Image: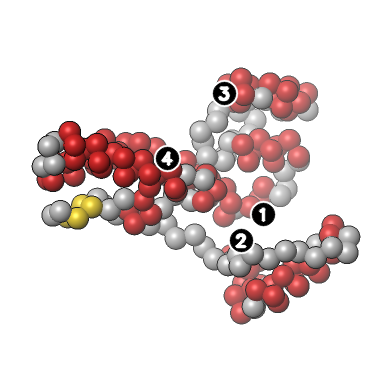
């Protein structure tokens, strides 16, 4: 979280220095092994939103239009689906640009807004990570699974009946964990 990041001075460290700090923190768990770095930059994820999707004959798609938090893994999919929807709208209107841009937005906005709600919920979960660390293992797992709001208890029971059974065996139940 931002407080831990600032308190430990990660903002002023090189990647190599940050890796060494993390190796010291996780020394026992690493059991003599080294961490591998991959040019990961510690930063807050930019939250891009645009009220207007187009202007005249110019249109935004993908991350230029809006960003979905990386934790739900939908950025590339959204960009490709935007491009497909835009092409379809152009074709369906006989390449009438104003009508196509309006049709593109009308078709995509409800889908995109729903996904952005899930992404924002998942981002909030990660931004409040310290509070999740206080949870017991099964509570933590349930918290993680439900972080985006897209998997309710009933759906989870169908997708992973063994997990739900183990969760309930611990005296936990639907509605026990609320984000």
Is residue 141 at least partly visible in the picture?
yes
- Residues under labels 1 and 4: Cα distance? 25 Å
Q: Earlier in the sequence, mark 4 or mark 3?
A: 4
Q: How is the image coloured?
A: secondary structure
Query: In the structure shown, which secondary structural element does the residue marked by tag 4 occupy?
Result: helix
Q: Earlier in the sequence, mark 3 or mark 2?
A: 2
Q: Earlier in the sequence, mark 1 or mark 4?
A: 4
Query: In the structure shown, which secondary structural element does the residue marked by tag 1 occupy?
Result: helix
Q: Quadrant of the N terminus?
A: bottom right
- Residues under labels 2 and 1: Cα distance? 8 Å
Task: Confirm or deny contact between disc 3 and disc 2 (CB under 8 A).
Answer: no
Query: Looking at the rendering, which quadrant does residue 19 occupy?
Result: bottom right
Task: Confirm or deny contact between disc 2 and disc 1 (CB under 8 A).
Answer: yes
Q: Earlier in the sequence, mark 2 or mark 4?
A: 2
Residue 124 position, x and y percent, is 53, 50
Residue behind mark 1: 130
Which residue corresponds to the image point at 68% horizontal and 66% vertical from the top-left?
37
- Residues under labels 4 and 3: Cα distance? 17 Å
The circle drawn on residue 155 is 3
Residue behind mark 4: 115
Q: Earlier in the sequence, mark 2 or mark 1?
A: 2
């Amino acid at each position: 979280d931002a407080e831990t990041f600032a308190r430990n001075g990660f903002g002023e460290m090189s990647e190599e220095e940050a890796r060494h700090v993390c190796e010291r923190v996780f020394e026992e768990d690493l059991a003599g092994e080294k961490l591998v770095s991959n040019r990961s930059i510690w930063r807050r994820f930019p939250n891009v939103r645009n009220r207007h999707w187009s202007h005249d004959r110019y249109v935004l798609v993908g991350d230029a239009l809006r960003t979905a938090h990386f934790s739900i893994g939908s950025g590339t999919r959204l960009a490709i689906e935007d491009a497909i929807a835009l092409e379809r709208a152009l074709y369906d209107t006989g390449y009438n640009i104003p009508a196509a841009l309006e049709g593109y937005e009308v078709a995509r906005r409800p889908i995109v807004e729903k996904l952005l709600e899930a992404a924002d919920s998942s981002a909030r979960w990660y931004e409040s990570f310290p509070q999740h660390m206080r949870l017991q293992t099964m509570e933590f797992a349930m918290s993680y699974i439900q972080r985006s709001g897209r998997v309710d208890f009933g759906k989870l029971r169908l997708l992973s009946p063994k997990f739900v059974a183990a969760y309930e065996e611990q005296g936990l139940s639907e509605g026990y964990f609320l984000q």
